[in-house]
Amino acid sequence: KAGVTQTPRYLIKTRGQQVTLSCSPISGHRSVSWYQQTPGQGLQFLFEYFSETQRNKGNFPGRFSGRQFSNSRSEMNVSTLELGDSALYLCASQTTGGGAGYQETQYFGPGTRLLVL
Amino acid sequence: QKEVEQDPGPLSVPEGAIVSLNCTYSNSAFQYFMWYRQYSRKGPELLMYTYSSGNKEDGRFTAQVDKSSKYISLFIRDSQPSDSATYLCAMSYTGRRALTFGSGTRLQVQP
């Protein structure tokens, strides 16, 4: 079974621009979460989508947004980029997202490395 | 204070050594505990998953959870140079729908 895929893998942008990152979850997984990883802050949760609805959101400014499509694929967008947005952006997928026997286990993609100049 | 504390290392051990990696946490609601391995410039890879307290073994890896002490551990037996990576603990609880990670411990296994 194919794993989580993320595109693009690398991206260079300048301050003030916006960027859109894409994630395709593992086949059959309906929940997609996004995380930001930086050397200083580690892995931090951005938001989670299930059945095209955002169910949970981390402590990030409104410049960070996302969406999920009917095929479970997800995109995240960062507007008005700042230097501090340089990070590895990781997408993770999990199965049903709830219910009896549910495991809060997430499987990560390789990430998109964003550099803001 | 962070919800999950993890010693960043680096931890350097000779090949064949037993490695012990640990995390402490403050939120007693955490029920699900995971260990991820992350190689340089790659995404985290799930190694071990444990629900509530107890031990779980998978090959050379053993995960332990002590909820009374809010302390989790990962043991690696017969460590190999290929185990050199950053190890991240992560935890969650039903309904949270997000993982809280430790900062990661960088492990180097010397041949």
Image (tube, rainbow, N blue to C red):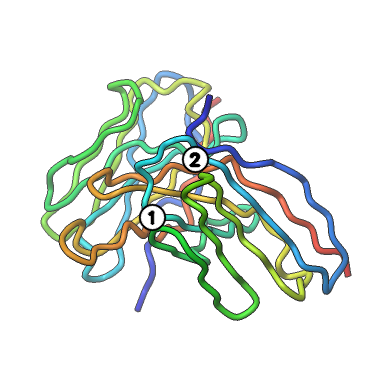
- For the residue pair A70 and A47, the one nearer the viewer reads as A47
Which residue appears at 72% of the width and 73% of the height? B77
- For the residue pair B27 and B8, the one nearer the viewer reads as B27
Q: In the rendered view, does A75 fall on the left or right side of B91?
A: left
Q: Amino acid at mark 1?
A: Tyr
Label 2 sits on residue = A43
Which residue appears at 17% of the width and 40% of the height? A54
Identify the chain of the residue marked 1, using the numbered disc in the image.
B
The image quadrant where one finds the N terminus of chain A is bottom left
Locate residue A91, reporting x and y percent: 38, 51
Identify the chain of the residue marked 2, using the numbered disc in the image.
A
Spot the residue most to the front. B68
Which residue appears at 32% of the width and 54% of the height? A23
Q: In the rendered view, does A8 fall on the left or right side of B43?
A: left
| Label 1: which secondary element | strand
Q: Amino acid at mark 2?
A: Leu
The image quadrant where one finds the C terminus of chain A is top right
Label 1 sits on residue = B32
Locate residue B110, reporting x and y percent: 87, 64
Is residue B92 shown above or below A66?
below
- Residue A72 numbered tag: none
Is residue A20 shown above or below B16?
above
Is residue B23 shown above or below B48?
above
| Label 2: which secondary element | strand
Q: In the rendered view, does A95 fall on the left or right side of A12?
A: left
Dot 1 crowding, Cα within 10 Å, few <14, some 14–19, many 20+ = many
Asked whether the residues under the numbered discs 2 and 1 touch, taking CB atoms below 8 Å apart as contact, a structural biologist would say no
